[in-house]
Structures are given as structure tokens and as C-alpha cells.
Image (cartoon, rainbow, N blue to C red):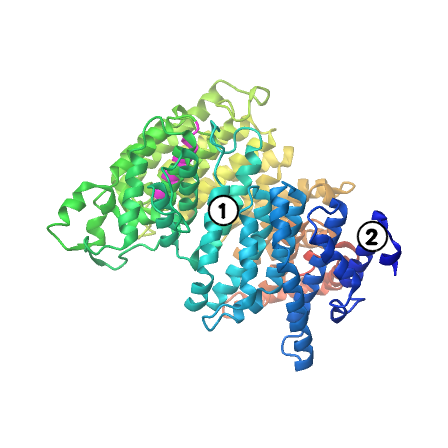
């Protein structure tokens, strides 16, 4: 009635559609009434007219999308219901399917008229229809035949082919859902049915990833570059999810074929590729490179070059082409090529023969090679190429990332190149790379360092650490104070501390005899005076202190029990500093020391004294007005420290006179609405309770149980009341599980 009386009043028409949409949303109108509804008929009439007013067109789109969403929910809810309900649903599905499919022509007209808003509206409807029919079309295609609803994917792919990538990304959730369903079904027959659609999708996304032909720099440079780079990142994630349907190797070969002037992703002819199409194809290859199944994973590899796997033919050509890129190649092509080389690290590890002439020549004489023999065929050209790229502006960060990937994946190859890697580490500040990239390189070098023979580790890590420590020592000698620090420059001690931390963190040599000195022990001992002086000179700068504590943490973790001789000087350093400045990072470092050394009877009392010294200034801070709320990091680190004590040395802590006040503080912190801090408090209580219940076979179980029971008898009722009150009145719902 309202529609009939609305005449040409736009606002009334929009209001009617919005009202009807809201009723569908809250299920006030049953879906079975939709086919006969004049409002739905009116909405479809609007959509069939590509010249309709934009506001009305968008409102009609919202209406149809909500109906499709409700239909999808009903289909899932009523699956397995009586026949009559199923028949009604099927009739409604067919009605809507037919109506939406008739919108293909209006969509093409909107594209022809460059009406972006209406193109987006049609894409939303097509995508929503596909998601509604997703389970139906997959289930209906399980016998190898295509379900009729699969046609909607062709319409969605038409939208993916729109010249503007904003239209294409509307469909991404559909493809994620389809890949998830197909992955769970794990059916080759189903993959075969949907393979053409995924091939078309990848081809269209490849075209969307092309930069403008007149673009001069990297993808994120220039107007709108960051937004386009984000889109390409989402494309990469999507392709990684769906590529299993077509096969990574097949996708890789198709992209390579398009680079060489062969047929494109859908078999269409391709002319000589331009730099922008080349870069886009390399970008897609980079997304799937790690999924290429390596040929020959057995201990003995039977090599037939005349009957080699296709990927063993294509990848070497790709690598060779990258290594021989002309100097005048567009920087974006070079950048993406380097990324691709890094992503091929696992393939390189399994196929060193593809990178050097040595094995290719040998293959004519031998047919069997062990894995160990293959490791001696080293990829010198790759390393030289990446080293050259480190010196080039704009390419350095990509090259450092590729080197890190290769070091991580090919450690046995790279040990023979450690001297070269060490030379790279010496020259870090001469390369055109960020500090994050430099840290990545040090991580890669450290990974290889850990694979050296034990007698080679000590001099190697000493030299690697001295490069960083000498610069740090220079700052200390020159008395570069807090006010003189320029963040991110060589005057910033954080630069050198982070690099030292990366070395200690990733140097994890295999120790066969724990009674022998750790190969890194002497170096950690030599680094301590430098770190101690950093703590002394920059004690007021919380940023520097946090990084210094982090560095000490990884140094301690690196050598473990072998650094016990440093426990006393570390404690003597951090306790006075915490008393004065109350940086919570010292509490965190204390928890690391407890974790490493509290099981040692010679260390535990030193650690307990450290905890008791920490408690007084901590409580003074937290007892201030809103102290818990204003200092959540302190709460977090304090109770992490106490929880580590309960895990490693419960009886000394439970006997300590400080335990009562620690529990009282924890009870007060139960209502603290801060996720990390509250989680640490709950972990402390969990460990407190379980220290009196677990490890019953240990001789100290009776004492532990009695000490915990004494605490619970005194404070248990208060704790329960506080927990209940916090759950009901104070804490967010996502925190209540703890």
C-alpha cells in the first residue's frame, strides 16, 4: 500500500525498503513470504535498472543481501528438516537464484557507464548469492558433476575482472570460505570441478596486481602506493589459501609461461611481457613458491634429467633469469625477484644442483646422490647476487630478508660460507638497509653460526658480538647522554642492544655434553661489563633499559646454567636501579633469572633476596591512588616473577615472610581490567594452588601442601569473594576464562 501511494517520492521508497530489510533481519517476516512480496519485486526492479537513483539502488542492494543472508542461515539451520520445509527452501533458493542471475546485463551496463557504485552493489549481491549457495553447490558437485548454482561463480569472477581492484576485494571472503570447504572435503574430484574458477581468479588477481606502466619506484611509493601495497598483501594471502585447488607447481608454471610469452593463466595468448606484467607474475610466483613440492626428499635421490619433474625444469630457469637481470631492469621487478628468491629457499635447499654447473655436469656420469653429497654443491651465484643487491638503494631490505630465509632453510649449505656471512655482518652499516633488516641479517648469520663445529663457535660469536659492542662502548666512552640520543641513528644505544640481542637469541648450538663449558659462555661474560655500563649510564631512560634487559635476557637464555657466575653481579646491578627508577623491565629480567637458576640450591637464596628487595618499592608504587590501574606493566611483571618462583622453587617462596603481602596484593589486583596484568595474577594463583597438589611423588610434597593450605585457610574466603565480585562487576567478558 505504501509503495503504491509513494508515487515518485524517493525518501518514502528508501524508507520502505529499509523498513522491510530490518524486518527480515529480525525474522519478523518469514522467508516463505519473500517470493510473493511486492517489496522484493520492487527491489529487483530497481536493481534491473542500471540508471536507478544511487541511494535507491544501494538500499535495494542491502535488502536483497539481507534476504540472501537470512536464506543462508535458514538453510544451515533447517538442514535435515522435514521434506516440506526443504521443498520451500529449495523453491525460494531457485527463485532468488534466477532473479539475481538476471542482473548480469545491468552489471555490464554499469561497467560500461563507469558507474562504480552500482558495480559494487551488483558485486555484493552476486557474492552474497554465492556464499548462500556455497555448501549446496559443493555438496551437489561431489559426484563430479557441476551443480547448477556453480554458474554464480562465473558472475562473481566477472566482477573480479572489473578494472578497479576495490570491486574484486569484495569477493575475497567467498574464496576463503570456498577454499576452506574444499580443503575439509579433501576430494580430487571436487578440486577438479572448481579448478577452472580458481585459475580464472588467480589470473584476474595477477592483472590487478600490476602497477601502472609509468610508475618509477617500488609499489608503496607514490600516491596511493601504501593502499595498493596493502591490497597486494591481501591478494598474496588469498592465493596462498586457494592455490592447493590448482596446485602450486601448476600456478608457478603458468605464471612462468606468461613471462616467456607463452599462454597466460587461462591459456590466452600473451605478447611480449611488459615490466609491469612481469612484476605482477613474479609477485604471484612469490606467493606460491614455498608450496612447490620439492622433488626428491628421500635419503638417496634418483635423478633422471630427461624425465625430470616439471618444477625441476621451470624453477632453475626462473632462478637463472633472476640472477641475470639486466642493470636497467625496473627496480620493482628486481625487488620482487629478490623476494621470490627468498621464498624459494626450501626448494634451493633440496635442489642445490639447479644452481651450479658442478652437479649438472656430474649428473651425466652419476645417477645416485646422497643428501649430504648434495650439500656440497653451493649456490655461490645466489649469494653474490644478494650481496650485490644489499648495496643498492631500495633493494637492501629485500635482499637481507632473502638471505635470512636461505640461512634458515639451508643451514648445512651455508656453514661453508660463514666467513662470507661474517664479512657481511662487519659491513652492515655500509649497506642501504634499515636496522630491522640488519637485525634480520644478524639473525641469519647467528643461525649458521650455531651449526659450526664447537671449536669454531666461540671465536665466531666473539667477533660477531664485538662489532656491536665496540659501537656501544664508543657511546659509553664518549658519554653520549640521554639528551644526545637520536633515535634510529648510531648514537642510539638501542640499535646496538637489539643487534646483540638478536645474536644471542638465535645462536642455539647443540650441546652434547652439558658438563663441558658452553661455547658462548666466555663471550657472554665478556659482554656483561658493557651491558652493566649501559644500565648505569642510561638508567633513567626506560626505553634503553627495556632493551638492555632484553639483551641480558637472551644472553642468559643462550648459555643457561653456564652463566650462573653472572647471577650475583646482575642482581646487584638491577636491584638498586629498580629501587630508584622502578622500571618494570627489571622485574621481568628477575623472572628470567628465577626461571634459569632457582632450581640451583646455591642460587635460590640470592634470588629470594632479590625478590624481597623488589617487593618494598613495588608495593610503594602500587599502593598509590589508582596504583594498580596506572602501573599494569609492574603488576604483570611482579606476578610473573612470583609465578616463576612457585614453578621453580616453591618452598623458599612459601616460607618467605613476604608471601602473605604478595597474596594480599594479588587479591587486590583480581579486579584489574587489564588483560596481561590480570592474566599474570591469575597465573600466580593457579601456580599457588597447584604447588600444593602436583608432584606428589616428590619428598617435599607434604611441606608444600601444608604451606599452601595455611595460606588458603587465612585468605581463601577473601580470594573467592574477590574473584566472584571481579567476574560480575569489573572484568571484561574475554578475561573471565582465566
* Percent x, y of residue 219: 49, 34
- Residue pictured at 58% horizontal, 45% vertical: 609
Above or below, comparing residue 187 to residue 727 in the picture = below
Above or below, comparing residue 26 to residue 502 in the picture = below
Q: Residue 279 sits in which quadrant? A: top left
Residue nearest the viewer, comparing 343 with 104: 104
34 left or right of 317?
right
- Residue pictured at 65% horizontal, 70% vertical: 75
Residue on which disc 1 sits: 205
Few, some or many residues within 10 Å of mark 2 (<14, 14–19, 20+): many
Taking the image as drawn, is residue 111 in sight?
yes
* Percent x, y of residue 319: 30, 41
Q: Look at the numbered disc 1 and give the secondary structure of its residue.
A: helix
Above or below, comparing residue 173 to residue 234 in the picture = below
Quadrant (top left, top right, bottom left, bottom right) of the C terminus? bottom right
Q: Residue 262 sits in which quadrant? A: top left
Q: Residue furthest left?
A: 365
* Percent x, y of residue 462: 34, 34
User: Which dot, 2 or 1, sits closer to the camera?
Assistant: 2
Q: Look at the numbered disc 2 and give the secondary structure of its residue.
A: helix
Magenta-span inclusion, residue 26:
no
Mark 2 to mark 1 CA distance (whole Å): 38 Å
Residue on which disc 2 sits: 13
Residue nearest the viewer, comparing 104 with 343: 104
* Percent x, y of residue 581: 64, 33
| Magenta span | 394-407
Q: Earlier in the sequence, mark 2 or mark 1?
A: 2
Magenta-span inclusion, residue 404:
yes
Few, some or many residues within 10 Å of mark 1 (<14, 14–19, 20+): many
- Say which mark, if any, is on residue 422: none
Q: Main secondary structure of the magenta part?
A: helix
Residue nearest the viewer, comparing 723 with 130: 130
Amino acid at each position: 500500500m505504501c509503495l503504491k501511494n509513494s508515487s515518485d517520492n524517493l525518501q518514502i521508497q528508501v524508507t520502505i525498503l529499509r523498513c522491510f530489510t530490518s524486518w527480515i533481519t529480525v525474522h519478523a517476516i518469514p522467508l516463505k513470504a519473500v517470493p510473493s512480496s511486492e517489496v522484493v519485486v520492487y527491489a529487483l526492479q530497481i536493481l534491473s535498472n542500471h540508471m536507478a537513483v544511487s541511494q535507491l539502488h544501494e538500499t535495494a542492494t542491502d535488502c536483497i543481501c539481507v534476504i540472501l543472508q537470512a536464506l543462508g542461515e535458514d538453510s544451515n539451520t533447517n538442514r535435515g528438516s522435514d521434506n516440506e520445509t526443504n521443498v520451500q527452501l529449495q523453491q525460494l533458493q531457485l527463485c532468488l537464484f534466477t532473479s539475481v542471475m538476471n542482473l548480469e546485463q545491468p552489471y555490464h551496463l554499469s561497467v560500461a557507464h563507469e558507474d562504480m557504485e552500482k558495480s559494487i552493489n551488483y558485486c555484493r549481491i552476486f557474492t552474497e548469492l554465492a556464499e548462500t549457495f556455497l555448501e549446496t553447490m559443493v555438496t551437489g558437485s561431489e559426484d563430479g558433476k557441476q551443480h547448477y548454482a556453480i554458474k554464480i561463480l562465473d558472475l562473481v569472477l566477472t566482477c573480479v575482472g572489473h578494472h578497479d581492484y576495490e570491486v574484486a576485494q569484495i569477493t575475497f571472503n567467498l574464496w576463503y570460505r570456498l577454499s576452506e570447504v574444499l580443503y575439509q572435503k579433501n576430494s580430487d574430484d571436487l578440486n577438479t570441478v572448481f579448478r577452472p574458477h580458481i585459475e580464472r581468479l588467480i589470473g584476474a588477481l595477477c592483472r590487478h596486481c600490476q602497477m601502472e606502466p609509468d610508475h618509477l619506484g617500488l609499489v608503496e611509493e607514490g600516491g596511493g602506493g601504501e593502499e595498493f601495497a596493502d591490497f597486494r598483501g591481501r591478494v598474496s594471502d588469498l592465493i596462498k589459501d586457494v592455490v592447493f585447488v590448482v596446485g602450486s607447481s601448476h600456478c608457478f608454471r603458468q605464471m612462468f609461461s606468461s613471462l616467456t610469452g607463452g599462454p597466460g593463466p587461462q591459456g590466452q595468448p600473451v605478447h611480449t611481457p611488459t615490466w609491469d606484467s612481469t612484476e605482477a607474475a613474479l609477485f604471484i610466483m612469490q606467493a606460491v613458491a614455498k608450496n612447490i613440492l620439492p622433488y626428491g626428499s628421500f635419503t638417496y635421490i634418483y635423478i633422471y634429467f630427461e624425465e625430470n619433474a616439471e618444477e625441476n625444469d621451470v624453477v632453475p630457469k626462473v632462478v637463472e633469469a633472476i640472477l641475470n637481470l639486466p642493470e636497467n631492469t625496473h627496480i620493482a621487478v628486481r625487488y620482487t625477484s629478490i623476494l621470490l628468491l627468498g621464498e624459494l629457499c626450501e626448494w634451493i635447499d633440496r635442489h642445490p644442483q639447479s644452481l651450479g654447473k658442478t652437479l649438472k655436469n656430474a649428473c651425466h656420469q652419476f645417477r645416485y646422490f646422497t643428501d649430504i653429497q648434495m650439500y656440497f654443491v653451493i649456490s655461490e651465484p645466489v649469494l653474490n647476487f644478494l650481496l650485490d643487491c644489499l648495496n643498492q638503494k631500495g633493494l637492501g631490505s629485500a635482499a637481507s630478508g632473502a638471505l635470512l630465509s636461505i640461512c634458515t632453510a639451508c643451514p648445512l649449505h651455508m656453514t661453508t660460507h660463514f666467513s662470507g656471512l661474517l664479512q657481511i655482518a662487519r659491513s652492515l652499516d655500509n649497506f642501504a638497509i634499515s636496522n630491522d633488516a640488519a637485525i634480520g641479517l644478524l639473525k641469519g648469520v647467528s643461525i649458521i653460526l650455531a651449526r659450526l663445529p664447537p671449536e669454531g663457535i666461540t671465536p665466531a660469536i666473539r667477533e660477531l658480538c664485538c662489532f656491536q659492542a665496540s659501537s656501544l662502548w664508543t657511546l659509553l666512552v664518549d658519554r653520549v647522554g640521554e639528551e644526545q640520543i637520536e633515535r634510529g641513528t648510531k648514537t642510539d644505544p638501542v640499535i646496538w642492544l637489539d643487534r646483540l640481542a638478536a645474536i644471542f637469541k638465535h645462536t642455539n648450538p647443540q650441546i652434547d655434553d652439558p658438563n663441558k663449558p658452553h661455547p658462548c659462555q666466555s663471550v657472554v661474560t665478556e659482554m656483561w661489563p658493557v651491558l652493566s655500563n649501559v644500565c648505569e649510564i642510561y638508567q633513567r631512560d626506560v626505553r634503553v633499559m627495556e632493551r638492555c634487559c632484553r639483551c641480558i635476557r637472551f644472553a642468559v637464555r643462550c648459555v643457561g646454567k653456564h652463566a650462573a657466575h653472572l647471577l650475583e653481579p646482575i642482581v646487584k646491578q638491577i636491584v638498586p636501579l629498580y629501587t630508584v627508577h622502578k622500571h618494570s623491565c627489571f622485574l621481568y629480567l628477575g623472572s628470567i633469572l628465577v626461571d634459569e637458576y632457582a632450581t640451583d640450591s646455591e642460587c635460590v637464596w640470592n634470588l629470594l633476596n632479590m625478590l624481597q628487595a623488589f617487593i618494598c618499592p613495588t608495593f610503594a608504587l602500587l599502593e598509590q591512588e589508582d596504583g594498580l590501574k596506572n602501573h599494569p606493566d609492574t603488576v604483570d611483571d611482579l606476578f610473573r616473577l612470583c609465578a616463576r618462583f612457585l614453578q621453580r622453587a616453591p618452598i623458599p617462596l612459601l616460607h618467605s615472610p613476604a608471601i602473605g603481602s604478595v597474596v594480599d596484593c594479588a587479591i587486590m589486583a583480581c579486579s584489574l581490567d587489564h588483560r596481561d596484568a590480570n592474566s599474570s595474577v591469575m597465573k600466580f594463583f593457579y601456580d599457588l594452588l597447584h604447588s600444593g597438589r602436583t608432584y606428589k611423588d616428590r619428598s617435599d610434597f607434604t611441606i608444600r601442601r601444608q604451606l599452601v593450605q595455611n595460606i588458603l585457610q587465612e585468605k581463601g574466603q577473601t580470594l573467592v569473594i574477590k574473584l566472584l565480585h571481579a567476574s560480575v562487576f569489573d572484568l571484561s567478558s574475554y578475561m573471565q576464562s582465566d
